[in-house]
Image: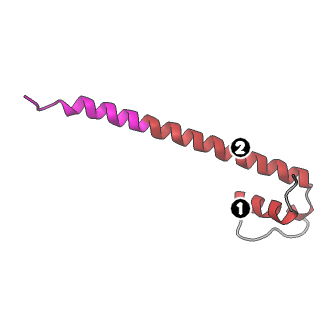
């Protein structure tokens, strides 16, 4: 299903963190297929970055937990 041109442009501007619409002769005059490709690229990159963030978070939690186990037994009699 093809997105409405306004939704396509909004999504692209949002992904590029623009706070204003591009001028005529710029993105407005680009191929809708290219804009869809850009949207796909931004979406795929965001998903990959989220996966990497989750991996790093899990790694930090494991390191914190193992560090806590090592130091938690010190000082006990």
Is residue 5 depicted above or below 64 in this figure? below
The residue most toward the front is: 1
The residue singled out by tag 2 in the image is: 44
In terms of secondary structure, where does tag 2 sit?
helix
Number of other residues with Cα within 10 Å of mark 1, as a class: few under 14, some 14 to 19, many 20 or more: few
x 77%, y 47%: residue: 40
Q: Specify start and end residues of the magenta stretch as a single range.
A: 60-77
Number of other residues with Cα within 10 Å of mark 2, as a class: few under 14, some 14 to 19, many 20 or more: few
Q: Nearer the viewer, residue 29 or 7?
A: 7
x 57%, y 39%: residue: 52
Left or right of 64 on screen, residue 1: right
Left or right of 42 on screen, residue 51: left
Quote the CA–CA distance across marks 2 and 1.
15 Å
Occupied quadrant, residue 31:
bottom right
Residue 10 in the image, given as x and y percentages of width and height: 77, 64
Q: Is residue 69 magenta?
A: yes
The mark found on residue 14 in the picture is 1
The residue most toward the left is: 77
């Amino acid at each position: 299903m093809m997105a409405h041109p306004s939704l396509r442009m909004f999504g692209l501007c949002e992904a590029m963190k623009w706070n204003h619409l591009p001028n005529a002769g710029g993105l407005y005059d680009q191929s809708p297929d290219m804009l869809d490709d850009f949207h796909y690229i931004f979406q795929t990159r965001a998903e990959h970055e989220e996966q990497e963030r989750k991996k790093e978070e899990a790694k930090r939690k494991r390191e914190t937990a193992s560090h806590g186990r090592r130091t938690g037994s010190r000082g006990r009699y």
